[in-house]
Image (tube, coloured by chain):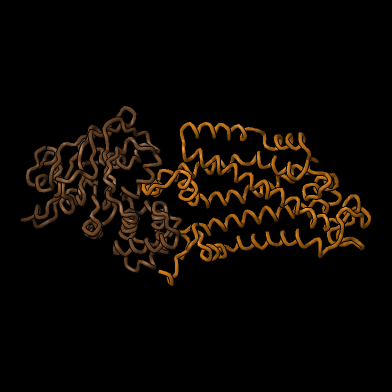
Amino acid sequence: MANSDPPLLSVRELTVTFDAFTAVDRVSFDLHEGQTLAVVGESGSGKSVTALSIMRLVELGTRGRITGGEILFRLPDGAVIDLIQQSESVMRDMRGNNISMIFQEPLTSLNPVYTVGNQVAEAVMLHQGLDRAEAMDRALEVFELVRIPEARQRLGEYPHQLSGGMRQRVMIAMALSCDPTVLIADEPTTALDVTIQAQILGLMRELQNETNAAVIIITHDMGVVAEVADDVVVMNQSRVVEQGSVYDIFERPAEPYTRALLASVPQLGSMAGRDEPARFDLVGEA
Amino acid sequence: MTDVMMPDQQELVPAGRDAWRMFLRNRAAVAGLIMFFGILFMTFFGPMLYDEDPNDIVARPFLEPGTEGAPAMGTDYLGRDVLAGVINGGSTTLTVAAIAAVMIVAIGVTIGALAGFYGGTVDTVLMRFTEFFQVLPALLFAMVVVTLFEPSARTISIAIGLVLWPSLARLTRAEFLRLRNLEFVKAARAIGSTDLRIISRVIFPNALPPLIVSTTLVMGAAILFEAGLAFLGLGDPNTLSWGLMIGLNRGNFLNAWWTVTFPGLAIFITVLSFSLIGDGLQDAFNPKLRGR
């Protein structure tokens, strides 16, 4: 890890509240170029809200308010800005361009009434000032980048004509279409079946090597963490409980919560010696 | 990539030929379309083919169709040709309905979209405004507007537009409420789309099918409204319309059925054609039905 560089994204004491409820409580972490950071935690631990706050999307259409902290982002020209202080129009220019996001549900993240090629081209046109034909060229390029077979033909298809894995590839293509420096993936594989999960994770890993984007991957799945992350932030009840490199977290989890999270993954071989299927132990019985 | 076939350049899902194919599959819709074109043809070319002035007295009053010397649809209480009236009365009715529909869609969709998309205070204010128009007795309000101003086709269109937009506004709002929290709207924000873009290019096309159906129904309602106003004597007395014909002849319905039945039939067919077309468009705009 080239941790000597100044961080690309630095979240400092971020606090987000929904009315009286504090969804994110003084969360801090750094993200460096080329790094994959996993934010792990159970449902409701504040990990998605953290991601939406970085995009400054948490305040749009919800009751969420960022009430404290700063989110320092290093622009390609080296200037560092605090995203929390930026106007909505500055943020609009950043979204998709500097920071992109992939959502959990590839089935519903694509607009059903446009062809997927159109949607990717749309994102390109928004930020790069290309005309439609040039944007379509770029869409084809990113489709090939994310290994969509018969990419040219796929450009003209509608979301409902594609499988879940293909749709998630389209989402990734859309997110990468403007060469963002930070990519936030909010549970990118949760809605996919296991074999497709492995493909998408492998793809994300390859793409990261090719584009050198920094990736924040939000997940509750420790298996995903082990496969893709360099560093891990463990969140529980709105707070960061532990952070460190993926080796430290897996080898020497310091916090009881992290250990509990790790223990919750069913282990291959735990059935060794039994001949018949067995049910999970009830809580407290183990 | 110059020689490559571009995927549909069209923005909307009803990618031309596909949508058309789905529309054609709905037999009733095709029938509606044929009826509508029939009405249009009659309105625009009828006066040339059947060269009879609807205001001329051509024969004895109350000649039943089929009797000797009677025109095809008989004559009314002044001896005017009913067929000529039906042919020439359509243009007023259709113009009024078209202008009213444009107004209804413009006001209804704008207000409904803003209310549904922004929610909160914007929604409350706009919906109270909508409700104000909704609780007005529609026909009475339209009558007042027409009475206060001159009873011209324009005034009548505006009056109809003013009373009929709330239903479309509420429907648009409901659709926007449903759609605005979906993932693809979030995704559109995440690529940096502006509110205007999200409203017009992301959510609106998804809200179209029910809106189109509703618009065709509302056009039917506008035609009935125009007829109703004319029937009550509030239409432009110098411009012939189907409603006016029914209004003028209503006292003779029991002894001369043809004087009101034929203009009534024209209204019925026009309204029915709009409903059937709306139904067909609903199929055509649904991408999930495509490719079957």
Is A172 situated left or right of B224 in this image?
left
Name the residue rendered at 50%, 62% in the picture.
Answer: B15
Left or right: residue B201 versus residue A193 is right
State the count of labels: 0
Residue ranking furthest to the top: A20
Q: Quadrant of the C terminus of chain A?
A: top left
Q: Residue at x 38, y 57 (%)?
A: A120
Determine the image quadrant of residue B270: bottom right
Residue extending farthest left: A273
Q: Is residue B260 left or right of residue A99?
A: right
Q: Which chain is brown?
A: A
Q: Position of residue B220 (x, y in %)?
A: 66, 49
Percent across and percent down for residue B268 are 71, 53
Q: B52 and B269: which one is in front? A: B52
Query: Which of B21/A275 is in front?
Result: B21
The quadrant holding residue B156 is: top right
B132 or B275, nearer to the observer: B132
Q: Is residue A232 visible?
A: yes
Residue B231 position (above or below residue B290): above
x, y (%) of residue A18? 33, 32
x, y (%) of residue B236?
A: 80, 44
Q: Which hue is chain B drawn in?
A: orange
Residue A185 visible to an observer of this rendering: no
Relative height, residue B167 to residue B284 (above, below): above
| Residue closest to the far bottom | B3
Q: Is residue A211 above or below residue B171?
A: below
